[in-house]
């Protein structure tokens, strides 16, 4: 079934088409939500809210871009809305609370996989995690991030820099002693 057929069926509010759309995109979109959430339960809430919004806003999809990209944008926006509503997004944390150090060399272990990276991203403080996801993964500019989150562009850049350094620290503590030696 094509994306166009799925959209038409969802616009007609046909449950079968809504279920097919959900089944086609839920795993990828759960991945998006997991990057913003601190816990899988939060990600599930974000995903549910996101799909509700997708079905509510289906009439705004113009078909000029990919359906997946349009849904992804909604999931990111709903994840940010969820974080704001639940006051989980503290954009600034005290530098002493971050407990990170700058390693001399930054090589990622050979055995690193997507699940390991997701786990490390979820360990970031909410503000770091949000800016890191928006900039490094979603491709937003710091100006766009600042506008979306109501922060300054400088704060966005600072949070991104701190997030990268924090991730390097997490890598050092999570890797085996042999792998950690590669980072020094």
Image (cartoon, grey):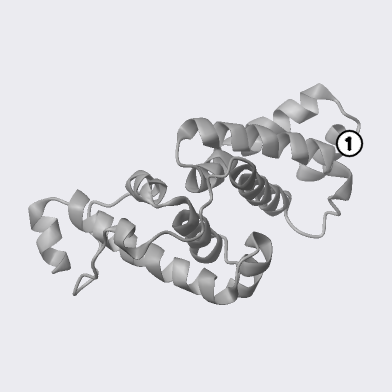
Q: Position of residue 107 (x, y in %)?
A: 23, 67
Instruction: State the residue position of label 1.
Output: 11
Q: Position of residue 4 (x, y in %)?
A: 82, 44
- Asked whether, in this view, residue 96 is left or right of residue 41, the answer is left
Q: Residue at x 61, y 38 (%)?
A: 46
Instruction: Note whether residue 33 is visible.
Output: yes
Q: Residue at x 78, y 23 (%)?
A: 16
Q: Position of residue 66 (x, y in %)?
A: 72, 54
- Asked whether, in this view, residue 94 is left or right of residue 150, the answer is left
- Would you place residue 32 above or below residue 49 in this image? below
- Asked whether, in this view, residue 74 is left or right of residue 11, the answer is left
Instruction: Note whether residue 1 is visible.
Output: no
Q: Residue at x 65, y 50 (%)?
A: 72
Q: Residue at x 73, y 49 (%)?
A: 67
Q: Quadrant of the N terminus?
A: top right
Q: Residues within 10 Å of mark 1 (few under 14, many from 20)?
A: some
Q: Nearer the viewer, residue 27 or 5?
A: 27
Q: Quadrant of the C terminus?
A: bottom left
Q: Nearer the viewer, residue 49 or 107?
A: 49
Number of dots carrying numbers: 1
Q: Nearer the viewer, residue 176 or 20?
A: 176
Q: Secondary structure at mark 1?
A: helix
């Amino acid at each position: 079934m094509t994306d166009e057929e799925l959209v038409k069926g969802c616009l007609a509010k046909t449950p079968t088409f809504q279920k097919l759309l959900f089944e086609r995109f839920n795993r990828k979109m759960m991945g998006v939500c997991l990057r913003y959430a601190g816990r899988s339960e939060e990600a599930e809430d974000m995903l549910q809210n996101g799909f509700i919004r997708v079905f509510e806003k289906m009439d705004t999809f113009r078909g000029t871009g990919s359906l997946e990209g349009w849904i992804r944008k909604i999931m990111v926006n709903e994840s940010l809305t969820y974080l704001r509503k639940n006051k989980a997004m503290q954009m600034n944390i005290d530098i002493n609370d971050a407990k990170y150090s700058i390693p001399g060399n930054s090589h990622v272990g050979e055995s690193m996989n997507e699940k390991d990276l997701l786990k490390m991203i979820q360990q970031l403080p909410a503000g770091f995690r949000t800016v890191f996801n928006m900039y490094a993964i979603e491709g937003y500019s710091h100006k766009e991030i600042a506008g979306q989150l109501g922060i300054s562009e400088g704060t966005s850049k600072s949070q991104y820099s701190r997030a990268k350094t924090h991730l390097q620290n997490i890598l050092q503590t999570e890797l085996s002693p042999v792998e950690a030696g590669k980072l020094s």
